[in-house]
Amino acid sequence: MTEQDTTLQYNSFEDPRCEGYLEDGRTGMSPSTLKRAFLNNLFYVQGKFKALATPNDYYMALAYAIRDRLLQRWINTAAIYTAQGSRTVAYFSAEFLMGPHLGNNLINLDIYKDVEKGIAEMGLNLGELLEQEEEPGLGNGGLGRLAACYLDSLATLEIPSLGYGIRYEFGIFDQEIEDGWQVEITDKWLRFGNPWEIARPEWAVEVKLGGHTDHYVDDHGRYRIRWVPDQQVTGIPYDTPILGCQTNTANTLRLWTAEAPESFNFNAFNSGDYLGAVYEKVVSENISKVLYPNDDSSQGKKLRLTQQYFFVSCSLQDMIRILVGQELPLEKFHEKFAVQLNDTHPAIAVAELMRLLIDMHHMSWDSAWSITQRTFAYTNHTLLPEALERWPVELFGSLLPRHLEIIYELNDRFLDEVRIKFPEDDSRLSRMSLIDESGERYVRMAHLACVGSHAINGVAALHTELLKQDVLYDFYQMYPGKFQNKTNGVTPRRFMVLSNPALTELVTSKIGDTWIKNLGELQKLEAWADNPEFQQQWRQIKQANKQELAAYIQKHNGIIVDPNSIFDILAKRFHEYKRQYLDLLHIVTLYNRIKANPDIEITPRTFIFGGKAAPGYFMAKLIIKLINSVADVINRDPDVRGRLKVVFLKNYNVKLAQRIYPAADLSEQISTAGKEASGTGNMKFALNGALTIGTLDGANVEIREEVGAENFFLFGLTAEQVYAKRASGYNPMEYYNSNAELRLALDRIASGFFSHGDTELFKPLVDSLLHHDQYFLLADYQSYIDCQEQVGLAYRDQDRWTHMSILNAARMGKFSSDRSIQDYCREIWKVEPVTITLENSEVTDSSFTATVI
Ligand code: F58
């Protein structure tokens, strides 16, 4: 069999080679085999026949049919990696915001259209079945979604890899809007079962918590330390296959669930204490119960640290099991595995690997430290000081007494190194110490990550520069060679092929389909940017996507919006630094202009917002309320005459994002310069042909470089100007006093105009701008308003706009997560692809051949 034959190509429904050949019912790809599998699952898995089946039954039946096709690839992949002892990336992340699996797997298997047709022949609609899937919302925002995009690219690039994280029973809350306010509802994503995961209780591990340490001399006269915990929990791994696009590689996402070691404490049970008996179980299971819904600050909660330690310890123990299973010595841990720490959430891994190597496997400190440093690399995702994690020493020691000892020892040795490099510089020592001793004592997780890693990276060029100059300045001086930039990327499979099929088809009709795995090829579209017919098709597709979103808005918000208006969209987590409020000030300004002059010419716009606020973040929640209040007034005011509409789409998640990006004309990326580490929504919008209005922040800088300044709406202060302004004493009131339109907008909000006369409701928002304005909204206001004016004018010239839109998409090549992952592979992980072959369409044992590239 040639290599061609072993790829997915022969799996097409249309392929004549499938005719007359009865394929294996669990792996075959012909239409008849898939239909048979689907109906079998309906009967034998769901226990239903057609008359009784619900849409969810159909979804499950299809999901299981597709999972069987994945399993064949998954098992082959695992067997090849095992046989070859391949070097493997372990991506440690407290969050994986995967989005629904079914559609993505159909795309990556390259059978979406065939299945759509087959399903239609049975009188069903694939889109409706896809809608049934509860998305696993195991992340807050960009950081969790980035992890998911990276898993997609790792599999597509055939890189042996494992994603390690937590299987939260409740992911990010569902957002409801009641009377304009955000209300949080528990996300019960597992309620109907999860067809994509397989529990692996045979690989359960034990994790200790609390207690104290004993120092003693063992029988061989060696000084040893024993951790005597006061609690133990069991970690059960649940595995989900992650299929690459048009490859046979299926890697693993391994998420841990916490359980009590015994379901009952029988002593307590026998003595009649039933509640005491189940208490331990409840306490243990709490660990993986819920995702913390904060998207910025570290709150210092013990359960959060427990979660972090729990998944890190489970994962490192699992990796040691894999290593030992492959008969490799522990000394080769760092050769077998490259571990990426996705922010500091898994940074306790540095101390845990030391503990495992020294206490459990009797390795010397120096050998263990050398292995540890060569294993880990750390990605920083934030410049906000309040987001840098630190744990009160007392809390830390009460949960992880042995780790605290290890950290103290690491710190002593590290500070000696600092002393040698920078003699007599005590303030540097206290700045760099792993322990913050300026007041209450804290363990600084970013410092632990920096010391324990051989590479440290930011997620966009500007962000990495600011890390070096500011947040991690001392560490940069100490270890300049560790610092690297790795600009974020997004997967074009989910955020273009799956979510924007019409545009995918148009692009493919012109330049072929290789861009799907090599996004740089999109550049070929530039040749079409001024072609009237192509422009026409491009516009029609955007228009149709906007109509679909308009229908969604009508259904969910009861608001009728005009698909000919500019769809001006701001969709991301709510945070003051992201400046949703600045967008609102623009809206109120336009409204004021209309009220002052009802005949004024304004390019019609639909302002669309989406995003969740952390449940305890008062200001962010108040901004959501203000958006809804402004919407209520503007959408009803006859003076506006359809020129402005304001929509808040509730429960922004991956599924909704996939509807939003294809329908956007204008992407709002308006954070205060120097605050957004990168952003990734900015890339997804532009890939789908939206133009960006943005500041020089995060990856906006590089997006503008790529698409050209003339195709990007730039406004606002630079990061440097923001720093200078802050240093020289920023007074927002000066802007308020000197800008009539700004004053009118703020006064209108303060006057109770949008709150039924209540002047108290939005006072905290108005006051915070007038008296603090930490994020420089007033300083950027006029520049933003002027820039929006330019947007409105540009949109009136549809040929020009379309030209810009095409060029934006055509120049997004750099922002594929495939490029990011290739950079990580080459410059940090030093890992190579491994080709997975399927001997035939049936499941093979592990005796097949494989090629290492
Ligand atoms: C985000 N961070 C950055 N954190 O804000 C964004 O600029 C960047 O593009 C993205 O990471 C990917 O690099 C982010 O999403 C969180 O959600 C954390 C969750 C846990 C608590 C701390 C914040």
Image: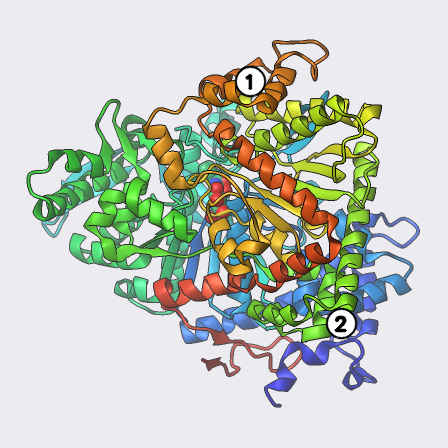
* CA distance for labels 1 and 2: 64 Å
Q: Nearer the viewer, residue 791 or 508?
A: 791
Residue found 47% across the figure and 18% down from its top: 733
Count numbered badges in the picture.
2
Instruction: Mark 1: give few (<14), some (14-19) or many (20+) Cα within 10 Å.
Output: some
Q: Is residue 303 left or right of residue 44?
A: left
Residue found 39% across the figure and 69% down from its top: 831
Examine the image and state in which quarter residue 601 appears: top right
Residue closest to the far bottom: 1
Chosen colour scheme: rainbow
Q: Which mark is residue 25?
A: 2
Above or below, comparing residue 466 to residue 322 in the picture: above
Tag 1–tag 2 contact (CB < 8 Å): no
Instruction: Say which element carries label 1.
Output: helix
Residue found 17% across the figure and 52% down from its top: 365
Residue 180 appears in the figure: yes
Residue found 44% across the figure and 75% down from its top: 83
Instruction: Mark 2: give few (<14), some (14-19) or many (20+) Cα within 10 Å.
Output: many
Which mark lies nearer to you, 1 or 2?
1
Q: Which mark is residue 766?
A: 1
Quarter of the image containing the N terminus? bottom right
Q: Position of residue 288 (x, y in %)?
A: 51, 38
Q: Which mark is residue 821?
A: none
Q: Is residue 802 left or right of residue 71?
A: right
